[in-house]
Amino acid sequence: MQTRTYGDLFKLIQSLAGVGSFAPTEADDVANLINRRFLQAFNESPIWPRYLVTSEERDIISLNISGLGAGTSSDSSSVVNGNYILLGQDDGANGAVAGTNVYYNASLGTSDTTVIYKRTSTNRWEIEGSGNISVNSDGTISVQAGSGVAITLLVEADSQKKDNPSEVDTWTLTTANLSGTPLIVDKQLIPYAQTGKNTIGSFNRIHRKKAFLNQSAIEYEFFVDFDGANILNITSTTDNSAFVTYKKQFTPFTVTGSTVADFTGSTVEVPAEFFAYLAHATYADFLRMDGQTDKAFAEENTATVALALELEKVDIISNNNTVNKRFSTYVNRQSR
């Protein structure tokens, strides 16, 4: 992926305008117009190669807890409320029921985290803070039930014990740490953000396994809301990850300083595929701002042609691969 510099872009716009240097107020306007046009170019295609990430493994959120507040002497609500990931099934060796699901707070990670598990001695679901979890070589999970510095925060109070945390009707709270009524909801959600990975701007496709290799991979239907992509008809409720093809989040140009020299000397990278479009489209906006609508129309046409040429390149590439296509077959569409 080739790049140019923001300084080169700004100087080209000055040259198109026929000025040696923009006035300070004009320079700030031009910088705003560049970002406006940058967003417009960015939104023209869901598969700009520079911003496309294919089949990246992402965590699936399995539960969400909300509705809890501070206790009488401390506030543990921030480590209990939130999204939970299904880590796996417990091995039953250290006080949790063998084969039952173990969940951890996604924002805290797997170390010193809030953990949801089913305790063997009482057959009830418990939510512990500062929980101790380890992953065994065979993929099973070992929860050190009630050990060390772990704090029991909520326990299932139903007389008829439930199979899943979301089915529990009544929870007993440790009132020193928490207050309120917990609402626990099942999810099959892939959030926009995950620690250590790019923030997702838009979801293109979601597969159960690594896609675009030799084997077919089941592809999921999904819908997008404020929290992320919600998977429909997931193949297995024990799956804790999926593979997402997405477009990265848009990030506008940010130049340190606000003088003309700061803009023309900036080394911020500009995508080469957008360079000509940004120059002519921004100049067209500048002409409109100055009341020169006929000249602006001509520059707009030049900008449109420049962007259309880049879009044509992307279209040619996409016609020769399957990243932006969906072939409906029994193998990749069935959810059983």
Image: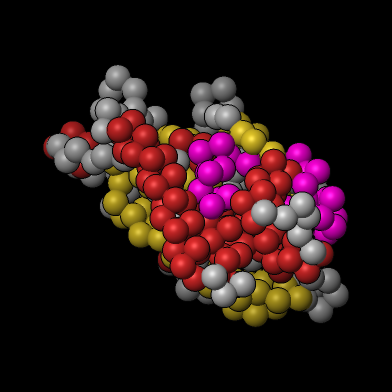
Name the residue at 61% across, 65% down: 286
Q: How is the image coloured?
A: secondary structure
* Residue 32 image point, x, y percent: 66, 63
Which is nearer the eye, 244 or 131? 244
Which is nearer the eye, 167 or 230? 230
Name the residue at 41% across, 60% down: 224
**Outermost residue, left direction?**
330
**Outermost residue, top direction?**
214
Which is nearer the eye, 124 or 3? 3
Asked if 53 appears above or below 174 in the picture, the reply is above
Q: Is residue 176 visible?
A: yes
Left or right: 13, with 167 as reference point: right
* Residue 5 image point, x, y percent: 69, 39
Which is nearer the eye, 80 or 267? 267
Q: Quadrant of the N terminus?
A: top right
Does 67 appear in magenta? Answer: no
How many numbered circles are shown?
0
Q: Can residue 158 be seen in this view?
A: no
Name the residue at 67% across, 54% down: 18
Does 271 appear in magenta? Answer: yes
Q: What stretch is highlighted in magenta?
A: 253-280
Q: Quadrant of the C terminus?
A: top left
* Residue 38 image point, x, y percent: 56, 54
Name the residue at 65% across, 80% down: 180
Q: Quadrant of residue 9?
A: top right
* Residue 147 image point, x, y percent: 75, 45
Q: Quadrant of residue 266?
A: top right
Q: In which quarter of the image is residue 151?
A: bottom right
